[in-house]
Image (spheres, rainbow, N blue to C red):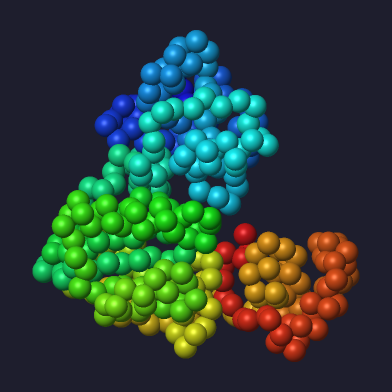
């Protein structure tokens, strides 16, 4: 958080002083007084201006940038109640300044680049409706639930779409209750009664299970087709604009025939998706465990593509792990589903 926007590009100043007042990513060299240990190795840092009297007093007294972080433990949503904050953060916070005004609706800060590119659409922009691209008319009321990670939901009707704020991981403690309350509130604001549900094709997603519990017709969409279609809509591609080639680089999502996609070349329009090519599918040893223990991914790719991989200095880390056991599991296809995910590579 900055005491003033002086010295920043005019575009960034305009965004910071707008009614939405988002976090704006700017070149770190333009931020005077920023500690070198903030976002090390990155060219940009997110900045914002004071938005309440206490912040103004602190920034006036310090006259330098202040690090402002969200009130939550890693892997959990921000605490909404004082009692939750005291319980969750007692081990990492030296002091608490509490408020007697309850937080009714969780709303993270929106994040944009100084060019105006929206990276996270939330406070200040939600729940304003967005126009759908040319050609979308008389869309029946549809509730679109999104996936389980970095979740948002969408209310589509007529020629408009209303996107929710960012919720994060639906598996995090407390997120489901916040999600359901936000959905109820937005439906009330827009007098919205859905006639159908659009859900991810992955049957194990929480959002897909919620869809099945709503007793409405459900349309299942392939995860990466949804990504490509969202990109088309963001850039105003017309409904009848024809096919495009989409290079979708992502984590794991459900593809055709139950395949686990994530690094695909697709031919798409809003209605259809054709798989043209993709990264070769490689075993994911331990399933979700491979995301928390990246050496498993390295081992799987070495087994698939690198003869005599044990002889390279880059693989020394594998030799310190229980790799023979995992290699046997890969060979026998035990808890090692194949996936073409690109996200596992970086």
Count every numbered label the image shows and give the total: 0
Q: Position of residue 321 (x, y in %)?
A: 85, 67
> Please, which residue is most extreme toward the top here?
61
**Residue drawn at 42 percent across, 74 percent down:** 209
Task: Let me know if residue 47 appears in the view.
Answer: yes
Please state if 334 lies on the left or on the right of 116 as rendered.
Answer: right
**Residue drawn at 16 percent across, 57 percent down:** 191
> Please, which residue is most extreme toward the left here?
138
Question: Looking at the image, which is closer to me, 281 or 107?
Answer: 107
Q: Position of residue 62 (x, y in %)?
A: 53, 13
In the displayed structure, 62 sits above or below 323; it is above
Please state if 52 lies on the left or on the right of 79 as rendered.
Answer: left
Q: Position of residue 254 (x, y in %)?
A: 48, 77
Q: Would you identify the image quadrant in which residue 237 lies?
A: bottom left
In the displayed structure, 121 sits above or below 323; it is above
Please state if 159 lies on the left or on the right of 328 as rendered.
Answer: left
Question: Looking at the image, which is closer to me, 130 or 56?
Answer: 56
Question: Looking at the image, which is closer to me, 268 or 61?
Answer: 61
In the displayed structure, 104 sits above or below 153; it is above
Task: Let me know if residue 5 appears in the view.
Answer: no
**Residue drawn at 65 percent across, 74 percent down:** 287
**Residue drawn at 52 percent across, 30 percent down:** 68
Q: Position of residue 43 (x, y in %)?
A: 55, 38
**Quarter of the figure with the C terminus:** bottom right
Question: Looking at the image, which is closer to me, 146 or 171?
Answer: 171
Q: Would you identify the image quadrant in which residue 88 lies?
A: top right
């Amino acid at each position: 958080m900055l005491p003033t926007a002086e010295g920043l590009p005019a575009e960034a100043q305009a965004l910071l002083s707008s009614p939405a007042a988002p976090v704006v990513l700017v070149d770190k060299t333009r931020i005077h007084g920023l500690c070198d240990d903030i976002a090390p190795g990155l060219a940009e840092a997110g900045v914002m201006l004071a938005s309440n009297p206490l912040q103004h007093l602190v920034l006036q007294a310090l006259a330098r940038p202040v690090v402002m972080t969200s009130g939550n433990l890693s892997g959990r949503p921000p605490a909404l109640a004082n009692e939750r904050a005291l319980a969750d953060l007692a081990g990492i916070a030296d002091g608490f300044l509490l408020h007697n005004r309850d937080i009714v609706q969780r709303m993270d800060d929106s994040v944009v680049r100084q060019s105006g590119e929206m990276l996270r659409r939330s406070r200040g922009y939600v729940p304003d409706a967005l126009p759908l691209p040319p050609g979308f008319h008389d869309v029946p009321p549809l509730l679109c639930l999104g996936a389980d990670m970095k979740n948002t939901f969408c209310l589509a009707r007529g020629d408009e779409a209303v996107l929710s704020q960012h919720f994060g991981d639906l598996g995090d403690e407390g997120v489901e209750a916040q999600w359901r309350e936000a959905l109820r509130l937005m439906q009330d604001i827009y007098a919205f009664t859905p006639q159908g549900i659009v859900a991810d094709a992955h049957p194990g997603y929480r959002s897909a299970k919620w869809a099945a519990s709503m007793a409405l017709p459900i349309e299942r969409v392939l995860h990466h087709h949804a990504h490509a279609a969202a990109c088309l809509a963001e850039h105003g591609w017309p409904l009848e604009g024809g096919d495009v080639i989409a290079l979708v680089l992502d984590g794991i999502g459900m593809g055709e025939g139950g395949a686990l996609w994530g690094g695909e070349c697709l031919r798409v329009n809003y209605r259809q998706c054709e798989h043209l090519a993709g990264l070769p599918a490689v075993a994911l040893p331990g399933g979700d465990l491979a995301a928390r223990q990246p050496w498993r991914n390295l081992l799987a790719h070495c087994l698939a593509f690198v003869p005599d991989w044990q002889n390279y200095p880059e693989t020394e880390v594998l030799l310190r792990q229980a790799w023979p056991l995992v290699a046997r599991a890969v060979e026998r296809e035990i808890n090692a589903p194949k996936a073409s995910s690109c996200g596992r590579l970086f």
